[in-house]
Amino acid sequence: MQVLPFYHQATNSWSYLLADEVNKVCALIDPVLDFEPASGAIQHDFVEVMLSRAADQQWQVAWVLETHIHADHLSAADFVRGQTGAKIGIGRGVEQVSALFAPVFNLGEQHPNVRVAFDQLFEPGDMILVGDLTVKVLATPGHTPACVAYQVEAAVFVLSLIHISEPTRQE
């Protein structure tokens, strides 16, 4: 097993490339899409670095694993699926999150269908394979009902946002 971390400075978040080096298969965990709020421009520079690393190693990208719905940044999962044919998975709680978002965004018929956006909705305890690596899905609700973690051997991939708050003053 090889794990390569990638830090996205603009969103203070981490993405990971998990690889079975023997079978040359990998998964991207929480890949970030570059988004410039002021202009609305979307770029793929960050995720392209991840995909280039996989290509350099001749690893087939089999999965994009999302730990949660990202309100703090945009996911590059659909871009990765389009480039590689990888499947996208997330916790089944995404259906609850989608139901909560529907009236907020008021998109009507254009509201994304989670069954189209994601290839697999995971239940706690589900197991998937990345090559010969067994990935166990762990429920970690809290940030959103869709939050999950992925355990592979002794490694656990969790919500990967770094939040630094100002210390509170004691009066």
Image (cartoon, rainbow, N blue to C red):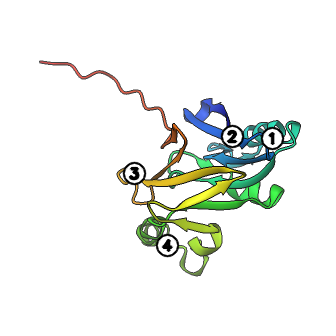
Left-right relation of 50 to 138: right
Neighbor class of circle 1 (other Cα within 10 Å; few <14, some 14-19, many 20+) is many
| Mark 2 vs mark 4, CA separation in Å | 35 Å
**Closer to the N terminus: mark 4 or mark 1?**
1
Q: Amino acid at mark 3?
A: Thr
Q: Amino acid at mark 4?
A: Asn
Identified at 65% across, 56% down, the residue is 129
| Mark 1 vs mark 3, CA separation in Å | 28 Å
Disc 4 vs disc 1: Cβ atoms closer than 8 Å? no
Disc 1 vs disc 2: Cβ atoms closer than 8 Å? yes
Provide residue 46's location: percent of width, then percent of height: 73, 38
Left-right relation of 77 to 150: right
Which numbered disc, 4 or 3, marks the residue closer to the eye? 3
Residue of label 2:
17
Q: Residue furthest left?
A: 171
Residue of label 4:
106
